[in-house]
Amino acid sequence: MTDYDNEQCEKVIKGVLGYHKDQGSWFGLASFAGHLTCDTTFEHYIHTAHLLAGEQLSNAYLELPITVLDLITGLDYSVIYRQDKTAYDATTKTVQLNKIRSYFVKKTAVNKTRLFKNIDQPDNNTSQQLLNSNLDDFKESNANSIFIHPKYADVIGFLEQMQELKENSRDQLLPEVAIRHGISLNDSKCLYLRASELFDDDRLLLGRPKGSKNQEVIIRALDRAYQMSIKDPEKLRVFIEIFAHKHNLNNSSIHFGIKETQIEMLQSFMLVGCQLIDASHWQVRAYSEQVVSDVKKT
């Protein structure tokens, strides 16, 4: 990780460690520094340890059987295929994790450094309690809806403005932006955290649809979704769960298989979808016109 070649590195090692080298480089270095174990050396002197570990991990070739990965993380073949078509090896039935690294970390990381924490008590437990408290407050403020903020139009404006900011300045400016849009600080923290987990890059929401007619469709759909989230939340929850499982944010299509269970899932999805966005705006494609007709009739 430096511009020294192997020969120069060896000279430095011999010069510094001498007879301590036989103990192994890290133990030898600890002895040279007068430490009983490597722990003290790492804690106080080795400030590049995270770089060394990160470099090793970035080059690691890790793979898991697709069945194991699915059971542990819930990421099945269709999800893996949408992220990288070459990640799955059909011969060995394994998934190369390095090919879906960014998506894998985004979807499975549970020990992320939280955006907001109590500076007086910076330990992880306190930070987690603070976040949980914020989420509880957020849920209470939306008791009439399963997950949609009652001021959803302001939320969209808030996220749009946050998205325009550079990523490293969002934390600092979040309270100011939240106030401009009339959203409480607790709500804004949770909204930002949830939105930032949807994408693998620095986006917080999908692009605005082009054209006034398309925007009208979306505005009407949001209003209908909010009403449905109050009057018939379970129906909307199923719709969202199917979308979350099937969506591909790189394009506007949602792919279903040809098995009977997949067709039933498509029908469940469209049953709600046509209540949110009029049927004339949906397009169903299949390998034959007859299949499309049968699905529509059913």
Image (cartoon, rainbow, N blue to C red):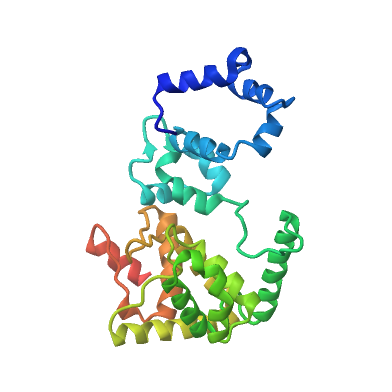
Q: Is residue 190 left or right of residue 91?
A: right
Quadrant where the image shows the N terminus: top left
Q: Is residue 59 left or right of residue 123?
A: left
The quadrant holding residue 296 is bottom left
Q: Is residue 76 left or right of residue 29?
A: left
Quadrant where the image shows the C terminus: bottom left
Above or below: residue 204 compared with residue 225: above
**How many numbered discs?**
0
Q: At 53% from the left edge and 73% from the top edge, which residue is drawn?
A: 236
Q: Nearer the viewer, residue 263 or 238?
A: 238
Above or below: residue 213 compared with residue 86: below
Above or below: residue 93 compared with residue 164: above
Q: Nearer the viewer, residue 195 or 254?
A: 195
The quadrant holding residue 96 is top left
* Position of residue 114 measured from the top left corner of the image (x, y, whole percent): 62, 60
Asked whether residue 235 appears in the rendered view, the answer is: no
* Position of residue 45 measured from the top left corner of the image (x, y, whole percent): 64, 36
- Check the image and name the residue furthest to the front: 15
* Position of residue 255 measured from the top left corner of the image (x, y, whole percent): 35, 59
Q: At 53% from the left edge and 49% from the top edge, which residue is drawn?
A: 74
Asked whether residue 131 appears in the rendered view, the answer is: yes
Q: At 56% from the left edge and 66% from the top edge, which residue is drawn?
A: 193
Q: At 57% from the left edge and 87% from the top edge, which residue is drawn?
A: 182
Q: Nearer the viewer, residue 69 or 287?
A: 69
The quadrant holding residue 266 is bottom left
* Position of residue 268 measured from the top left corner of the image (x, y, whole percent): 46, 67
